[in-house]
Structure formats: structure tokens, C-alpha cells
Image: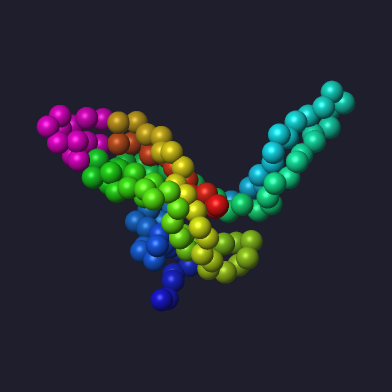
């Protein structure tokens, strides 16, 4: 399959909310703390965990329902262009809990509701 560098793919299918996303790498620490002398003590668990953060201005209820379906099963393959490796890579990821502001426009059919400022992320296993 030919992948476009500006598109995120979930299980081989183009994710509709790209290319507008924030990508990053995060360190995962276990019980990190700053001591009384002001030094941060880190118990590094993993380095360079890939993350993709999305902020969608407006979604319909039907679109939000499809997004929430990504969370079952929890894990999926995500293919995207990663700047640290300067290549298109595939990683096992999960979808973080979305946050949103909801506006009800149709009390009889929630698929027609409008959701604004939908924020969620994909996080590497």
C-alpha cells in the first residue's frame, strides 16, 4: 500500500481528521519527583513514546460515534509520518478519552447533534 506522508492511517484506512494534528514524542517516567534541593529525580520507563493529538473544531454525533468506536478494541495499528525517524512508520496505539463541548440540535436523534472542540489523542503502546 502506498501511504501519503500527510495522512494518518488507522488499521490501513485513512483517518479523516488529518493532516491537521500535533505530533510529538514523550518520555514515560515512573514516580518522577523533585527533591528538596530542587533536583528532578526520574525513573525512566520509556523514551520517545509517539503521540498524535487532535483538536477537531466541529463534529456531528455520527462522526463522534465513529471516533468512539476506535476505542473498542483498545489497540489499533496507526501509520503516520514521524519526524524523529523521518519516515512513515506503523505503531500499535490507543485512543485517549475524548473531551468535547456538546450542543444538542436534535433531541430525537443524537447522531445529528453537534460537538465542538473535540480533543483526543493517539498514544503509542
Q: Is residue 105 magenta?
A: yes
State the residue at coordinates (84%, 23%): 36
Residue found at the very far bottom of the displayed protein:
1
Quarter of the view holding residue 82? bottom right
Q: Against 123, is 84 above or below?
A: below
Instruction: Indicate the position of residue 75 as horizontal and vertical percent values.
Output: 45, 53
Instruction: Indicate the position of residue 83 as horizontal and vertical percent values.
Output: 60, 62
Instruction: Indicate the position of residue 22 as horizontal and vertical percent values.
Output: 51, 50
State the residue at coordinates (20%, 40%): 111
Q: Is residue 40 left or right of residue 86?
A: right
Q: Is residue 25 left or right of residue 62?
A: right
Q: Is residue 13 magenta?
A: no
Residue found at the very far top of the displayed protein:
36
State the residue at coordinates (15%, 29%): 107
Instruction: Indicate the position of residue 58 as horizontal and vertical percent values.
Output: 31, 41
Judge whether residue 19 can be spotted in this image: no
State the residue at coordinates (45%, 60%): 77
Write the start and end of the magenta stretch as one range: 103-114
Quadrant (top left, top right, bottom left, bottom right) of the N terminus:
bottom left
Judge whether residue 91 can be spotted in this image: yes
Amino acid at each position: 500500500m502506498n501511504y501519503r506522508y500527510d495522512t494518518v492511517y488507522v488499521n490501513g484506512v485513512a483517518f479523516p481528521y488529518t493532516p491537521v494534528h500535533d505530533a510529538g514524542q514523550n518520555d514515560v517516567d515512573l514516580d518522577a519527583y523533585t527533591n528538596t534541593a530542587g533536583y528532578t529525580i526520574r525513573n525512566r520507563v520509556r523514551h520517545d513514546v509517539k503521540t498524535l493529538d487532535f483538536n477537531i473544531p466541529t463534529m456531528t454525533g455520527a462522526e463522534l460515534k465513529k471516533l468512539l468506536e476506535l476505542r473498542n478494541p483498545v489497540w489499533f495499528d496507526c501509520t503516520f509520518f514521524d519526524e524523529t525517524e523521518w519516515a512513515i512508520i506503523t505503531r500499535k496505539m490507543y485512543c485517549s478519552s475524548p473531551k468535547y463541548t456538546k450542543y444538542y440540535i436534535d433531541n430525537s436523534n443524537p447522531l445529528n447533534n453537534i460537538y465542538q472542540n473535540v480533543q483526543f489523542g493517539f498514544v503509542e503502546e
